[in-house]
Every structure is written in C-alpha cells, then in structure tokens.
Amino acid sequence: MTDVIGAPADVLHTLFHSDQGGHEQVVLCQDRASGLKAVIAIHSTALGPALGGTRFYPYATEAEAVADALNLARGMSYKNAMAGLDHGGGKAVIIGDPERDKTEELLLAYGRMVASLGGRYVTACDVGTYVADMDVVARECRWTTGRSPENGGAGDSSVLTAFGVYQGMRASAQHLWGDPLLRGRKVGIAGVGKVGHHLVRHLLDEGAEVVITDVRPDAVQRILDQHPERVTAVADTEELIRVEGLDIYAPCALGGALNDHSVPVLTAKVVCGAANNQLAHPGVEKDLADRGILYAPDYVVNAGGVIQVADELHGFDFDRCRTKAAKIFDTTLAIFARAKEDGIPPAAAADRIAEQRMAEARAGHAVH
C-alpha cells in the first residue's frame, strides 16, 4: 500500500501516529541535474536548531531511506539533550553509493537544500561523508559543521567520539566493579574504522587487552601493524561476542548489533560502543538486564563527536570540547544511578532524562 506521494503508508503512519514519530518536519529533496535524492528529517527543535550528520548510503528502497532518517533524527534529539547541548535532533540521508555517486555538483545541490531550511537544521559528517565533503557543502550552506580546520572547522569528529566512549567504559567499570581503571580488562571492539582505531589507542594507553574485528581486512591489519604485540584479531563479530573472558564489548560499526541472536551468547559483562541504534528492537535492553549485562546507552557515550561539531558554531576550541566530552563519565554514572533507583534498564533511564529536558524546554517556550 502506498500513499499518493509514493511513500509507503507505514512511513507516514510512523511519522504521524506512532511513538517513533513526532517529527516536526521531513523534507524530500531532489536535484535531477546532479542525481541528488535526499531526505532531511527534523525531529525536534525544542532545545535549539536540529543538529545531526548526513549519511550517504545505497539504500535498497526510498522507504528504507526515509525510515532510517526518521530513526536517526529521533536518536539525535536524545543524544543532544543528554550531551547538554542547545540543539534539537535532525539527520539527513543521501540515497546512493558514495563511492560511485558522490560528486561536487551533488554535494553543492545538497548544500542548497540544507540552506533552504534557514538554520532549522545544522548538518555534519556521518557514514559515507567526510570532512572534505562538508567543505563542499559549506560553500552553499553556512549551517555546516565538521569542516576542515583550513575552512574554520574542527576536522575529524571521531577523535572525541572515541574519547567519549572511553569515558563511558570507565563509568561502566566504576559502576560494575567499583574501579574506573581498565588496566587488565579484556575489551572487544567490532569495527576499527573512523572511531574504533582511536578507541584502541585509549585502551592500550591504559593497559587494557584488546581484541578486534572489522569487515574490512585492511582496517584490522592497520591496527595489528601499529600494535603487533598488544592486539589480537578474530574473524568476525560472531566470534568476537563469544570470546572467553571478555569484560567489555564495544560495537563501533553499524546499528542493530544487540539483537535476539547476539545477546544470548554475549560473554561480556558490559556493552559500551560507538555505533548508533545498537538495540535492534524494543525489549533488547531488558534482555541485556536479565542476563546481568550492563548497557551504556549508545547515544550517551558516543556524543563526543556531536559535542565537537556543535562547538564549531561558536569558534572551535578543542580543549573546551574535550572538557565537555569528559563529562560523559559523570552522565553515564548518573544514568546507571537513575536506572537503579527507578528499577528500569539504563536505556530507559537515559530516555527519561532526555525527555524531561526536552519537555522542560517546550514548557519554557510555551510560557514565553
């Protein structure tokens, strides 16, 4: 069943009627000359302009692209609220293969689309887009972050994303074992690309034992070449989640890593990683809790990157950003405390805190 505009009715139902909806605005963008097809989803501007990256991905269907944009934008509202930023949540997806379809003309056309929203949405990098791409988008749109230092930007946001995840791991260790130190802990990282390879360095600096896997052999080899004595690799995520004696599992690739298949066999006592939308469906957080596995909510611990790009709008200062990202340690501990107090999983506790902040902001707007 499809609607007159060609979007499957279930997408429109999600937008207007379901708990996963509630978005303020969804924009379908097309520029036939460059081949641009994009979706910009603004979930909330209660706390300020929506901020979130641009994903460039070869979706199987347009409906899948719209659904992904809706989910990711909603996640950004919660992430920005928990990070203490004065930003709402938004996300954009460009439909296509970035290796084949990405051109300067397409990125400029996309920049014009974002600019047409007049600052309601601020964009940045995500899967399939890079600093160099944001420099191109910024030529048409001043509401662009994640640019290169030469163009007034902060550069690679994965540096502070990894630092924030590391702080989340320390908080998890403090909560579970009474000590934030990770020396001697065995940490499994699935995905050692943009964020994962920085995370490896933080863990090795502290004396942790690191096990890695990645779908790209070259990414694994790069880490092994840099740290031949101190890192081991396994064939795939299937093997990684079953590694004996694993203390912490860090999903750092695409979402959905925690599902009905992986949770029952997971050996780790903590899950804390950089990937977005790690819980494959509602109820997985309870399955983790039932198995005694501590879950550090993904959008809380991976907020270092968005803290970094948000700072760009005010004249970037790395030390100021790192100080803010270090607070992810305290935020994560506060979530674990709230979860214990309310008798709910940490993911539900984080949602409650974020929703409270957004509701207070909306109430404040209503008063004014």
Image (cartoon, rainbow, N blue to C red):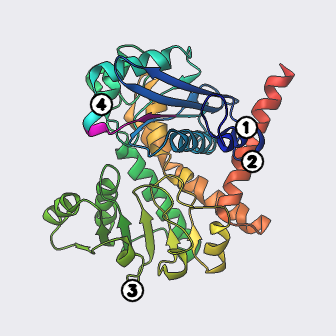
- Can you identify the residue that label 2 sits on? 19
Residue 94 among those drawn in magenta: yes
The quadrant holding residue 32 is top left
Q: Residue furthest bottom?
A: 244
User: Callout 3: helix, strand or loop?
Assistant: loop
Q: What residue is drawn where x is 31% and y is 53%?
A: 198
Whichever of labels 2 and 4 marks the residue nearer the N terminus, that label is 2
Q: Determine contact: label 1, label 2, CB under 8 Å.
A: yes
Q: Which residue is mark 1?
A: 22
CB contact under 8 Å: marks 3 and 2: no
> Which of labels 2 and 4 is toward the front?
4
Give the residues drawn in magenta, as a range: 92-99
**Residue ID at (39%, 17%):** 109
User: Foreground mark, 4 or 3?
Assistant: 4
The mark closer to the camera, 3 or 2, is: 2
Cα–Cα span, label 3 and label 1 = 43 Å
In 3D space, how far apart are the residues under numbered discs 1 and 2 (Cα atoms)? 7 Å
Of discs 1 and 4, which sits in the foreground?
4
Crowd tier of the residue under label 4, counting other residues whose Cα lies within 10 Å: few below 14, some 14–19, many 20 or above:
some
- Would you say residue 307 is visible in this rendering? yes
**Which residue, as the protein is rendered here, is positioned at the far right?**
367
Where 310 sits versus 185, above or below? Answer: above
Looking at the rendering, which quadrant does residue 343 occupy?
A: bottom right
Residue 274 bears which disc, if any? none
- What separation in Å lies between label 2 and label 4 (alpha carbons)? 34 Å
